Amino acid sequence: MSALEPNHLKEVFDKFGRYVVQQARTNLTKKKKNVSKTLYDSIQYKETTSQSGASFSFDFLMEEYGEFQDKGVSGIKKKYNTPYSYTNKMPPRGPLDKWAVRKGLQGVRDDKGRFVSRKSLVYLIQRKLYYKGIEPSYFFTRAFKLGFQRLPVEVREAFKLDVQDFMKFTLKNIF
């Protein structure tokens, strides 16, 4: 130990990362946005320590479409407070078709009792998303904010412990 090593801080941020991932996954399931479990399984955090060990970085990772589920997407008729919007293109048909299969949306009938093909059903879903957008779920944003509110006190305490450890080591080597 030659420099201040943030071991206690790492533990606090590790606990924070586990908490945010667990809460985000719980929120995703509660909001019934966990059809294929791909997004659920992709939510993780990554801690990277510098070569000297004196600093580290912290990142949260998930599938790219997770951000659209979290922040939402404005349609051409219904707007949400989000940086994303459909403007001149409908959402892609392929992922919606796979989603319809996983949800078991085959053999659907219309108001008159006529069979609606999956291709037609996917088009209707595609059109609805284009006009009304995707409502923000904030599954990750809420989890992050809750964890972040608890963080300041724990960080101060961990930093204090790291400084104390550093001082003990330094004083022991001096005397």
Image: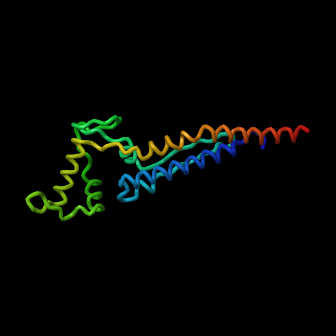
For residue 163, side relative to residue 15 (left or right): right
> Is 161 rendered above or below residue 98?
above
- Pinpoint residue 173: horizontal percent, then vertical percent: 87, 41
Residue nearest the observer in this picture, 70 or 29: 29
- Pinpoint residue 37: horizontal percent, then vertical percent: 40, 58
Q: Which residue is at 48% across, 50% downward?
A: 23
Q: Which residue is at 19% across, 51% downward?
A: 123
Q: Which residue is at 50% across, 51% downward?
A: 21
Extreme-left residue of the structure? 112
What color scheme is it?
Answer: rainbow
For residue 23, side relative to residue 130 (left or right): right
- Pinpoint residue 169: horizontal percent, then vertical percent: 82, 42
- Which quarter of the rendered picture does the N terminus lie within? top right
Looking at the rendering, which quadrant does residue 152 occupy?
top right
> Is 167 rendered above or below residue 29?
above
Task: Give the number of callouts.
Answer: 0
> Is 83 rendered above or below residue 23?
above
Q: Which residue is at 72% across, 42% downward?
A: 5
- Pinpoint residue 26: horizontal percent, then vertical percent: 45, 54
- Which quarter of the rendered picture does the C terminus lie within? top right
Residue nearest the observer in this picture, 11 or 92: 11
